[in-house]
Image (spheres, rainbow, N blue to C red):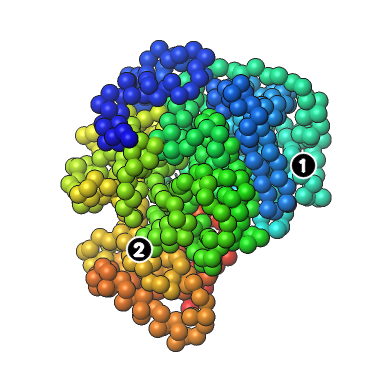
Amino acid sequence: MRDAQAFYRRSISDPDGFWGEQAQLIDWHVPPKQVLAQSNPPFRRWFVGGETNLCHNAVDRHLAERGEQPALIYLSTETGEERYYTFTELHREVNRCAAVLRSLGVDKGERVVIYMPMIAEAVISMLACARLGAVHSVVFGGFAAHNLALRIDDAKPCLLICADAGMRGGRAVPYKHLVDDAIAQAKCPPAHVLIVDRGLDPEMQWRHGRDVDYRDLREQFSDAQVPITWLESNEPSYILYTSGTTGKPKGIQRDVGGYAVALAASMKHIYNAQPGETMFTTSDIGWVVGHSYIVYGPLIHGMASIVYEGLPIRPDPGVWWKIVQDHQVSTMFSSPTAIRVLKKQDPAWLKKYDLSSLRYLFLAGEPLDEPTSRWITDGLGVPVLDHYWQTETGWAMLTLLPGIEHQPVKFGSPGFPAYGFNIKVVNELTGQECGAGEKGVLTVVPPLPPGCLSTVWGDDERYVNSYFGQFEHELLYFSSDWALRDADGYYFILGRSDDVINTAGHRLGTREIEEALQAHPALAEVAVVGVHDEVKGQVPVGFCVVKDPALIASAAGRAELEQSCIAKVTELLGPVAKPHRLHFVVALPKTRSGKLLRRSIQALAEGRETGDLSTLDDPNALEEIRRAVAQ
Ligand code: ATP
Ligand code: MG
C-alpha cells in the first residue's frame, strides 16, 4: 500500500512531475511539450502541444487488447430493450455515426447539440463528435423548449441530434416535438436535426429538408471508417451547463488532454477499478457525472459502462441491485437523492440479489446525511464513499483514495482534498485561512488541476469574475460551498455559501438544521430555508417529507410530529436553531439533477415569485410547497 498523503503532497509540490507521469495513462498522438503553462492566470493550460483524442482513448485504443470485451451495456426497464456492444462493435457504431455527422457538415470545432434520452445512441453520438474533433453540448433531456433554445443560441450548432421520445415511468415523453418548439424560438438554429426514431411518438412531424432519419443514414454509411481528428490538448471537447441550483446555469468548457488524463487517473486512484470490470453510474448523460463516469471515464479505463434508462424503483425497488448482480458490477456511482428514494422502500430489497461483485458505491451531488449513509452502508455491506465535486471540476475535489491507500470513512465527510487540488478553507469576506474546526468557504489555490473547466464558453470574463473574483488580494477559485476541516484533516461540506440563515444575529447553515431534522426517524427528506422575520431578521422554516403518510393524516398528528421534530433540533443544535415552522409535504422541488431548489422554496415561503425554474424536475412538488405555505 502506498501513502495517500505523500501522493497528494507531491501533486501540489511537483505538478509537472506528478501530472507528467499521470499523462502516461492515456495515448498521445503527439506527446506534450510542456506539462503546465500559466502565463495568464487564472487561465492555465495542461499538456501543451500534446495531441490526443477522447474517442481514440475511449474506443480505438482498446481494440487490440480487449476488442471482444463488453464496452457499452444498454438496459431500458422502460421499453424492455437490452443491447450489448463490445469495443469492436462500439468502434463500428461510432464510425458509422461519425460518417453520418460528417455528411451533415460536422467538422473539427463545429458544435453539435445532443438532446437525447438515456439510449446507446446518445453515448455513440458523443463519441462520434469527439472522433471528429467537434464540440458537443449535451442538454439534459426533458428541459423545456425555452432552455433548449438558450443553449442552442449559446453554442450555435450546425447540427442537433435528438430522439423522437424518451420514456419515464412507463410513459413516452416527446423530445422531437420540443426540439421543434425550441428551434422556432432560437436565433441561431442548426441546419439539420438528426433523429433517432424509436417509434415511441406516432405523432412526430418531420420537417422536410431539415430533419434527417438516423437509421437511413446509418445504413448508407454502414462500412464507413472515419479517421481520428487529433486535437491539441487544450482545444475544446465539450460544453456542459451547471445544474442551475443557484441561478443562471454556466456553460462550462472542457479541454481534451487534461480531461482524459484526469479521468484515467481517477479511475485508478479514486474508483480503484480494473479494466475489464463493469461500472454502473445511475446519473444521466446530461450531467457532468454522466459525461465523466457513464461515458468517458470507464471507457478510457477499458471498462464496460451501463447506460440505464429507467427509474430506481420500477418495476420494483430492487432493479438496481438486480443489474449489479446480472452484470457483475464492481463499481457503482449514484447520488444521495436516489438513495433517499430507496430509503423509503423496504430494506429487504438490498438483500435480495447477489452483490458479491460490488466493491464500492460512490455518491456525489449533494450533502450525504449521516443516517442515509449508515442505512445504505449497512444494507449493502460494501464501503459507501461520498465524494464532493462540481460540474466545473469534472471529477472529485474531495475524496478518499482507495486506489492508493485504505483510509477509514468518517460519516458525513467526503474525505480529503484530491491530488492536484490545493484546497484552502477561508473566511468568505477576508480570504484569511481558517483553522481546524473553523467554518469557511472552500477555495482552490490555482492552478486548477487537469480536467477542470478551461473557461466559460464564449465568456472569459465570466470565468474570471464568477470563479476568481471574490478576493482582491489573491486569486482563489471560489466554490461557493461552506466547508470545514477537522483536527484529523477530514473535510466537511456545510452547504452553499448563499444558504445561510441570519437569525437574531446568529448565522446558521441550512444544512446543519436539515441534518438535525434528518436524525428524526419519521422523516425521509427535509429542506430548510430562511424566511424573513420582522423581529429576528430571518427564521428557519422546514419542509419535510415523512416516511409514513399516516402519521400526518390528522391535524393532531401533524402538530405532534412538528413538536417532536422541533425538539430534535433543539436537542442537537440548541434553541437558536429551532425551526419556526415545519410543513409536511409529499415531495420537495428539485432540479432535474436531484438537487433541492432551496431558492424557489424560500421565495414561496416568503410569498415571492419563484424566479428561474428552468431546471425544475416536478412542478407538482412546487405546488405542494405553495399549498403548504398557504395553509
Ligand atoms: P449552479 O452552479 O448552476 O448553481 P450546481 O452548483 O447545483 O448549480 P453542480 O455543478 O451540478 O451544479 O453541483 C455542484 C454542487 O453540488 C457543489 O458545489 C455542492 O454544493 C454540491 N455537492 C456535490 N457533491 C457534494 C457532496 N459530496 N457533498 C455535499 N455537496 C455536494
Ligand atoms: Mg455550482
Q: Is residue 113 visible?
A: no
| Residue 361 image offset from top left, x and y in percent | 46, 49
Mark 2, Cα crowd under 10 Å, few <14 / some 14-19 / many 20+, is many
Tell which tag, 2 or 1, sits nearer the viewer: 2
Q: Is residue 509 visible?
A: yes
Give the residue number, with chain letter if any, for mark 1.
Answer: 197
What residue is rendered at 47% in x and 56% in y?
380
Disc 2, SS: helix
Marks 2 and 1 sit apart, C-alpha to C-alpha, by 45 Å
What residue is rendered at 33% in x and 55% in y?
411
Judge whether 232 appears above or below 254 on screen.
Answer: above
| Residue 218 image offset from top left, x and y in percent | 77, 29
Image quarter where the N terminus lies is: top left
Which one is nearer the viewer's eye here, 623 or 49? 49
| Kind of residue sitting beneath label 2 | Glu
Q: How many marks?
A: 2
What residue is rendered at 56% in x and 34% in y?
276
Residue lying furthest bottom: 556
583 sits left or right of 197 in the view: left
Give the residue number, with chain letter if any, for mark 2.
Answer: 515
